[in-house]
Image (spheres, rainbow, N blue to C red):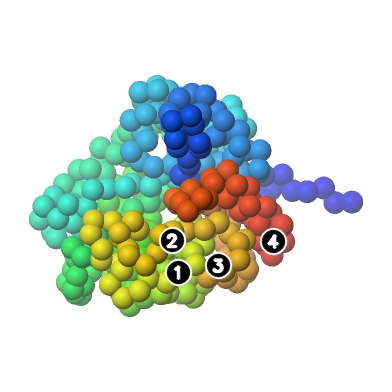
């Protein structure tokens, strides 16, 4: 009988993006509430078989305040049997007065933001810092070639900054992002430098925007530095990507956009996706994400266990 490969030997390892809520006496509590709730979260993620975690850039303040910084927090992650923090998502405030990649007058503020941000994270080694590459759709439309060129220009420069810290700059296209159509995504990457700007494929977000994430990945496979694997049951109706102030919350036809892998009615063909991942020779980390999993009676811990079961029993059988 052949022994199962160790985590170090596997071509694909699984990281968990740390959206999370658990039910406390006064209502939902996130894992950053206390050391106890964080420990319970990390134990659950490790128990179902994840190898590492991803997090959000804004969590660095809690890492400093509650744990003594990113390195000390990562020690806690490792003490619970997980490898490390793999990626961080830079959730910027896309205010067109100060932070809009299609507007050159905001570029210096964006560059300075990343000079400071990368210094804060420099005590640990990240793989990727993930960004939404454009401001919100309603602030960027109509999308023009010049706007795409300006956007590409600033991310090329940001990518040079992050590369200086050994971290890839990678772009994640939400369905409400100004760059979310097939044509605009393809044009944007034609203007960016593959040395400095990568693509981070979110299977659900691309489906919601009406794209086939497998075909998108196949076209840009050499630019892809990671994935968010999650599912959706809905494609956005015309105009739903432009609901102020937050299309994921304000869209009138859809109460819950995101679902875990392995549930009925999902629109993402994960078996085809994993086949493409294998056939394109991708190795490394795939991140599982459960954004707003507790909406409409959902449960984060249940969604996490179901997704990990699906990853182990379906997807890992495809990629051997």
Q: Residue at x 37, y 71 (%)?
A: 236
Residue at the disc numbered 1: 234
- In the rendered structure, which disc, 1 or 4, sits on the residue that comes first in sequence? 1
Question: Which residue is the extreme one toward the bottom?
Answer: 183
- In the rendered structure, which disc, 2 or 1, sits on the residue that comes first in sequence? 1
Under circle 2, the secondary element is: loop
Contact between marks 2 and 1 (CB within 8 A): the answer is: yes
Quarter of the image containing the C terminus? bottom right
Pointer 2 local density, CA inside 10 Å: few below 14, some 14–19, many at least 20: many
Tag on residue 266? 3
The residues tagged by marks 4 and 2 sit, at their Cα atoms, a distance apart of 23 Å
Q: Residue at x 28, y 72 (%)?
A: 239
Q: Mark 4 or mark 3, which is nearer to you?
A: 3
**Percent x, y for residue 260?**
55, 56
The residues tagged by marks 1 and 4 sit, at their Cα atoms, a distance apart of 23 Å
The residues tagged by marks 4 and 3 sit, at their Cα atoms, a distance apart of 15 Å
Contact between marks 3 and 2 (CB within 8 A): the answer is: no
- In the rendered structure, which disc, 4 or 3, sits on the residue that comes first in sequence? 3
Residue at the disc numbered 4: 314
Under circle 4, the secondary element is: helix
Pointer 3 local density, CA inside 10 Å: few below 14, some 14–19, many at least 20: some
**Percent x, y for residue 133?**
29, 59
Q: Quadrant of residue 177?
A: bottom left
Residue at the disc numbered 2: 257
Q: Residue at x 54, y 34 (%)?
A: 41
Is residue 154 visible to the viewer in this orientation of the structure?
A: no
271 displayed left or right of 15: right
Q: On screen, 189 above or below 256? A: below
Contact between marks 4 and 2 (CB within 8 A): the answer is: no
- In the rendered structure, which disc, 3 or 2, sits on the residue that comes first in sequence? 2
């Amino acid at each position: 009988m052949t022994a199962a490969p160790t985590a170090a030997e596997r071509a694909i390892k699984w990281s968990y993006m740390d959206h999370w809520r658990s039910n406390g006496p006064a209502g939902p509590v996130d894992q950053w509430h206390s050391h106890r709730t964080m420990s319970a979260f990390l134990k659950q993620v490790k128990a179902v078989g994840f190898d590492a975690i991803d997090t959000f850039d804004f969590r660095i303040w809690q890492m400093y305040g509650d744990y003594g910084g990113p390195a000390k927090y990562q020690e806690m992650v490792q003490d619970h049997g997980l490898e490390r923090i793999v990626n961080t998502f830079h959730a910027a405030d896309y205010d067109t007065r100060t932070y809009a990649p299609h507007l050159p007058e905001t570029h210096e503020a964006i560059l300075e933001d990343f000079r400071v941000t990368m210094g804060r994270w420099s005590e640990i080694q990240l793989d990727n810092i993930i960004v939404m590459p454009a401001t919100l759709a309603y602030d960027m439309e109509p999308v023009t070639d010049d706007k795409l060129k300006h956007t590409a220009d600033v991310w090329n420069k940001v990518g040079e900054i992050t590369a200086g810290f050994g971290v890839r700059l990678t772009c994640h296209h939400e369905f409400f992002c100004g760059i979310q159509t097939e044509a605009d995504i393809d044009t944007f990457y034609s203007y960016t430098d593959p040395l400095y700007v990568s693509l981070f494929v979110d299977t659900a977000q691309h489906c919601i925007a009406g794209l086939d994430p497998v075909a998108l990945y196949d076209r840009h496979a050499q630019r892809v530095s990671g994935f968010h694997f999650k599912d959706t049951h809905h494609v956005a109706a015309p105009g739903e990507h432009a609901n102020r102030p937050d299309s994921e919350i304000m869209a009138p036809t859809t109460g819950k956009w995101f679902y875990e892998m392995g549930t009925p009615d999902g629109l993402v063909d994960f078996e085809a996706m994993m086949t493409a991942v294998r056939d394109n020779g991708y190795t490394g980390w795939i991140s599982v994400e459960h954004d707003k999993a507790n909406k409409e009676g959902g449960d984060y811990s249940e969604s996490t266990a179901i997704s990990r079961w699906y990853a182990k029993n379906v997807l890992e059988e495809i990629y051997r």
